[in-house]
Every structure is written in structure tokens, then in C-alpha cells.
Amino acid sequence: MNKPSTLRRILTTDIPVVFIIMLAMGPFVWMILTSLTPTAQLSASGVSLSPAGWSMDNYIRLLEQTSFLGNMLDSLIIAAGTVVLGLAVSVTAAYALSRFRFPGRKLVMLQFLLVNMFPIVLLILPLFILMRKIGLLDTHLALILANSTVAIPFAVWMLRSYIGAIPRSLDEAAMIDGCSRLQALRRVVLPLAMPGIISTGIYIFITAWNEYLYALTLGGRNVRPVTVAIQTLIGEYQIEWGLLAAGGVVGALPATLLFLLVQRRLIGGLTQGAVKG
Amino acid sequence: MSTLAPSAPHDLTQVRPLRSRLMPYALLAPAVLVTLFIVFFPMVQAVVTSFYDLVLWKPNASRFVGFGNYIKLLHDPVFWTSLGHTAIWIGLTVPLQMGLGLVAALLLNREFPWRGLARALVIIPWALPSVVIALMWRWIYDPTTGVLNDILLYLSIIHSTVPWLADPHLALYAVIATLTWQGFPFFAVMILAGLQGIPQSQYEAASIDGASTWRQFVHITLPGIAPVLATAGLLRIIWVANSMDVIFVMTGGGPGYATHTLPLYAFIKARQNLDFGYGTAIAVTFTILLGAIVAVYIVRTMREVER
């Protein structure tokens, strides 16, 4: 096989890839440009394409005049809480599913897979009634629990495959050396599975951070995560696109950065199996 | 009867049978219990609620109506409209995402100097919150100041501004375009992983035999990524069918009922009319309809897991 010339490569590969990347990035870049254009200019002459017309005006207004930082804190508490709850109960479950063969194992795995497929709308209505009944409505805990409906099944499946990749002989060796099952899990399996646990945790964080419908339905007044808060930035009489775009950029930033950080390892895990998009 | 699979003869179960036999259940208990409480219990509740006439702001008027809500559903024109939209919604979005994802994956699988960067950047839409995506596209589609109209006017493709989201004939397709944009990176990434699993030697052998690029694509690439396409496609059908946050923020189901899909209809009924009985009846019906696809996916995945 002869290597294609550089020019040919640029024409058949680089340029089409640039188009795909522009398609993927374009709307987000447009939003960043919008957020950098001051509102007055936005309504007069549209989005400013040159740095000369840019200012941090919208961002300053976002931080000074709205409760956006507080909303970020709400999102942070909820997302971190979901990570902690999701991982805490899933690690042992995933270990059990990967190391033991016991009656009911298939049923349990099926259950976790099935849960991931449930329409959110089927859960959101009864969860609202449930949370109202036990007085959790509009609390962080309500949203942590709601997000866990997605996070736990996801984490169990991801961690099962990560732990499954660690040779059994390692925990058996530890047990022969006098460790109990749980000690073997804690001292041998957990450290080895740590990269997998971290990327699963980050994925849970991202999905919980980005979640909108639960936040809208179960939160709202006291607890208002960024995804809900962004919507309230829409002005009363006229949509404030500049401010809205600034909120969108800031709100999307934590998840996007985390995602870029772990994307390579995550994708390996995601492509192996059952995951919600 | 032994509870041990023959594959684990060295398990210490033989030493301490009972404790070890209970061990997996103890390890599973927290996850299973939490899931029962936050998923299965509410789900049963949902099915029960769907047999009641329950409007949240008049809880005392709640009464059992049997299949009443379901019968009402069959005579509800909005239900049938929403069902039709759901079919269009899935039928267009998933193939479009898959097609665009395939093109992106094939390109990103080629060799060029900035491949790593390109692969990272293409996933960005996937990581963005749905609300941000929805608002971003509302801004792009905006009839007076939106950039899409500007571009299309400049290119003389249209001659007057188009109200993308306000036109009942266009709104659904405009939202589908947004969802296609949001979801194609998922396919690209999955397909890319599949492509990397195809041995290079197959292509070399084919090109020695004089097979054209197209024939290589049809006879090597497509069969090679078929399992990935099937899995990703099924997952995506389920996900797209369920997803309503983008539509909800972009159009709220409007104009009129032009962008109602089934889950959105259920959500709006419950949220705006607080008609939880009827809303959950719609949600349950939708879940049953979706169940067929979920079943196919689950059978496939369980088979793969148990290999």
C-alpha cells in the first residue's frame, strides 16, 4: 500500500474533519461569542465576531445580579452527593456480581439493567408524590435520591466490568494470606479498581450536574441547581440572550472540563455495555 | 445442591459455607434496597395512580376509576398525535444520528496529525447540559435575531426569515435537528471503537485482491461494526424516546400540540394540569410500548455478559 500524499490527505481527511468539528463545536462557540457581546450591542448589531467588541459585561452581571453562584453550590452538593451515594452502594454490589455465582444473580443484574431503561417520566411523577409525602420536596436529598435512580444502576454495571477485569487470583491470594473477603475487597480490589471508580464517579457527577427534569420538578425554590437557574435568566419582557449565554457557558463548564479530562477512559467503559446515553 | 458454580472451585466457601453463601447478598443489599425504594416502589405507585382519578390540587376528590384513564386515552386525539410524533421523532432522529456518527467515525479513524484533538472536540455536544443545548438552539433558531436565518438569507437559500420553532409544520423537525446534533457524537464514539476492533490485515488482504474502497466498506467495515451499530442503535432508540428535556425547553410541546411526544404529554399533563392520574396513565402506556425495544436490548446485553 502506498501512502497518500499530504495534499490528498488534507483534501479527503483534514477538511472534512474540520467540517465535522465545526458542526459539533459551532453552536457552543456561537454561545460563547454571544456571552461576550454586551447586551446593548447584541440588540443593535448582533453578535460580535471580533475581540474588539467583546467584554465580560454579561459575566459580571451574572455573578453580581443573580444568585448564580448559589445555584452552582446547589448543583455541586447534589452532584457530589449523588456520586457518594451512587458509588458507596455500587462498589460492593459490583464486587458481588463479578466475584460470586449465586442464585438470583441474573435477576439482580437484569434489574439494574432494566432500571436504566425506565422512562424518566414514569418515575418523576410518583417520585414527586413520594417526596411530597415524606417532606423531602425542595431539598438536596430529594434530588440526590432522584439522580441515584440513574446513577446506581449505571455505576453497578460500569464497576462490574472494571472489577471483572481484575484477576480473581489476586483476592484469593490475599485471603490465603489471612485477609477476609471484605479486607481483600478493601485492600486489593479497591486500589486496583480505583481508575474505574474515579471515571464512573466523574460520569455520575456530569450526569447529575446536567440533569434538568428532576431538578425542575423536585427542586425549585430553596434548591435550584444551575440547569433550572439558567432558565430563570430569561428576562421578563424580553429574552436576555447575552446573560443567558453567559449562564449557559458557566453552567456547562464544570461538566465539560471534567468530561474532556476523562473522556478517553470513559469511552472505553461506555462502549463495553449497558449505559444510558 | 451447591450454590457454587464449578468455575470457582478455590473459593473459600467450602471452608465457611453459610457465611460465604450469604456474603453476596449482604454486599448487594444496599444497592438493591435503595433501588427498590427509589425506583420500583415509585413505579408500582405509578401503576396504581394510573387507575385513579387523581388531580393533585383536589386530593380529596381522588377516586378509583379502574381502566377509566386508559379508555379516556384511546379517545384522546392529543394522545394519538403525540404517538405519531414519537414515531417520527425516533424514526428520524436515530437514523440521522447514526448516519452522521458513522461519517464522523470513519473520518476520525483515518490518520492525520491532530486526530487526538479532533476526537476529543467532537464529543463536546454530548457533555453539555440539555438545557444549555435547548436554549442555545432557541437562540440560533430565533426568527428575528437568530444566526440560522442570517446564514440562510445570506446564502439565498431562503428569501424571508423562517420562524423555525413557531411554525407548527417545522417545529418538530427543528427540534429533531437539535437532537441529532446532540446525539451524533455518541454514535461517532461507539462506532469509532468498533472500527478500531477491525484488524488492519483484512483491509490489506482485500486491497491486494483488488477490492475497491466501497467494496471494502460494504464487506469488511459494515459487518465489523454491525454489532456496535445494533447495540448503540437500540440504546439510542430508548434514550431518544425517553428524552423530553430538550423539547420541553425549546418549545414546551408547542406551538399547539405540534411538538408533543408521549413522555412530554404525560409530563405536561401532570405538571401543568396537576392531573397525575391521567399523566401516569400516559406514562405507563408509553413504557409498555417502549418495553418491546427494551426487551430486545436486554436480551442482547444479558447474552453478551454471560458469553
Image: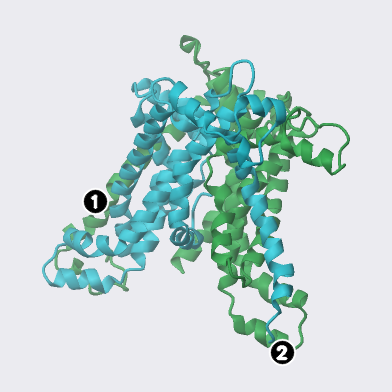
Chain colours: A cyan, B green
- Quarter that holds the N terminus of chain A: bottom right
B74 shown above or below A152:
above
Mark 1 vs mark 2, CA separation in Å:
59 Å
Q: Is residue A39 left or right of residue B33?
A: right
Near-viewer residue (B161 or A111): B161
Q: Amino acid at mark 1?
A: Ala
Element marked by disc 2 = helix
Count numbered badges in the picture.
2
Residue at the image position 67 percent from the left and 42 percent from the top: B178
Q: Quadrant of residue B233?
A: bottom right
Q: Amino acid at mark 2?
A: Ile
**Residue B231's disc number:** none
Residue occupying the far bottom of the picture: B208
Q: Provide residue B276's location: percent of width, then percent of height.
A: 53, 22
Q: Is residue B170 left or right of residue B241?
A: right
Q: Neighbour class for label 1 at 10 Å: few (<14), some, many (≥20)?
A: some
Residue highlighted by disc 2: B208
Element marked by disc 1 = helix
Residue highlighted by disc 1: B26
- The answer to whether residue B138 is visible is yes
Residue at the image position 43 percent from the left and 40 percent from the top: A208
Residue occupying the far left of the picture: A178
